[in-house]
Image: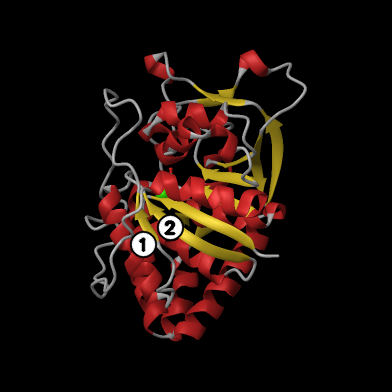
């Protein structure tokens, strides 16, 4: 049976690839997308999500607008570097104007209603801040506990952060929400910088999409913008990180990565370590753990699957 999936994302170039991965994978039934703040404002993330879905001929996937601010309204988060995703979040590439509206229902209620409906068949993949998830947990933890799995792109356990020396961007946007999520005892998979910085895409791959019609060409334009930024900011990597699409892949195929079991927390007290993901000392001796942390990746296997899925998708939609 297919996995029912909700994407909670700050669309964003790698988030756009996460949508395409979800649409392209035959094991996934994408039931909704929530636009989150982060790379851009939540409203724009929702609009970008509609444009990307429509480009991929997925006009029936509903899109919601999530919350616009961290759970702690006094928290002054680091500004996002708009250079990475462009002013419009999708590499300043123009896509046709959306011909449909975002849904009016509250995004947190959509999460809870879906959890009630699909229970353990539901997987939520969050590739932006974890605020909507934390709000859903605060509203109805029992319903949230019925969800099969929550996979996040976020955090860094074995490598430095990308916003501060210890903090990854999605966690840094709202450390308190991420801490609530990790300590909730829900079944969580953490796909952090530990593995996403090793999973790279280059123009060698995106040039193949240009042969496959309008959708492939637009995606190549969007992703090449991101690759150019990575070349400027992280020349040592030799490509752009597939942060968010890797999280979607791992959510349905854990064999892309190897994982350790750990009770994770986020440091929310000490300025120098604010937003760090680390093992929770208070739960070190617990007999159970609720987070699987990806620490190694079979990048060749993932990239081959990613390219097969994307090539087939772009060929299909033209
Ligand atoms: O740290 C990488 C993450 O931050 C990705 O999800 C990217 O899209 C940004 O949200
Ligand atoms: Ca993202």
Q: Residue furthest right?
A: 287
Can you give x and y, in whole percent of width and height, for residue 298 in the image?
A: 68, 54
Can you give x and y, in whole percent of width and height, for residue 30 in the image?
A: 52, 63
The vertical placement of 312 against 148, above or below, is below
Locate the N terminus by quadrant: bottom right
The vertical placement of 256 against 191, above or below, is below
Observer-nearest of 145 and 152: 145
Q: Secondary structure at mark 2?
A: strand
Crowding at dot 2, Cα within 10 Å, few <14 / some 14-19 / many 20+, comes out as many
Q: Which residue is mark 1?
A: 49
**Which dot marks residue 33?**
2
The quarter holding residue 121 reads: bottom right
Q: Secondary structure at mark 1?
A: helix
Crowding at dot 1, Cα within 10 Å, few <14 / some 14-19 / many 20+, comes out as many
User: Pointers 2 and 1 in contact (CB under 8 A)?
Assistant: yes
Can you give x and y, in whole percent of width and height, for residue 136 in the image?
A: 46, 38
Q: Nearer the viewer, mark 2 or mark 1?
A: 2
Alpha carbon distance from label 2 to label 1 = 7 Å
**Dot 2 or dot 1, earlier in sequence:** 2
In percent of the image, x 28 and y 27: which residue is there? Answer: 73
Q: Is residue 229 left or right of residue 259?
A: left
In percent of the image, x 51 and y 57: which residue is there? Answer: 245
In percent of the image, x 77 and y 22: which residue is there? Answer: 287
Count of marks placed on residues: 2
Observer-nearest of 122 and 72: 122
The quarter holding residue 291 reads: top right
């Amino acid at each position: 049976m297919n996995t029912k999936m909700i994407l909670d994302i700050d669309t964003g170039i790698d988030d756009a690839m996460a949508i395409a991965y979800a649409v392209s994978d035959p094991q996934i039934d994408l039931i909704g997308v929530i636009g989150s703040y982060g790379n851009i404002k939540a409203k724009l993330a929702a609009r970008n999500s509609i444009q990307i879905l429509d480009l991929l001929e997925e006009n029936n996937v509903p899109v919601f607008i999530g919350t616009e601010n961290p759970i702690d309204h006094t928290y002054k988060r680091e500004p996002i570097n708009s250079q990475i995703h462009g002013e419009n979040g999708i590499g300043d590439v123009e896509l046709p104007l959306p011909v449909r509206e975002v849904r009016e229902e509250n995004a947190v209620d959509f999460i809870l209603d879906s959890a009630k409906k699909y229970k353990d068949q539901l997987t939520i993949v969050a590739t932006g801040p974890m605020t909507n998830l934390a709000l859903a947990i605060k509203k109805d933890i029992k319903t949230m506990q019925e969800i099969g799995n929550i996979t996040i792109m976020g955090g860094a356990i074995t490598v430095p952060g990308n916003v501060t020396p210890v903090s990854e961007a999605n966690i840094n946007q709202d450390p308190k929400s991420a801490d609530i999520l990790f300590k909730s005892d829900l079944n969580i998979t953490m796909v952090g910088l530990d593995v996403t910085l090793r999973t790279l895409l280059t123009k060698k791959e995106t040039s193949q999409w240009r042969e496959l019609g309008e959708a492939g060409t637009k995606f190549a334009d969007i992703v090449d913008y991101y690759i150019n930024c990575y070349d400027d900011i992280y020349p040592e990597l030799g490509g752009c990180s597939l942060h968010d699409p890797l999280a979607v892949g791992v959510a349905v195929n854990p064999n892309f990565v190897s994982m350790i079991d750990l009770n994770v927390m986020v440091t929310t007290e000490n300025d120098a370590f604010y937003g760090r993901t680390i093992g929770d000392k208070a739960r070190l001796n617990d007999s159970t753990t609720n987070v699987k942390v990806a620490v190694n990746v079979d990048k060749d296997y993932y990239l081959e699957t990613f390219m097969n899925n994307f090539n087939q998708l772009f060929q299909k939609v033209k």
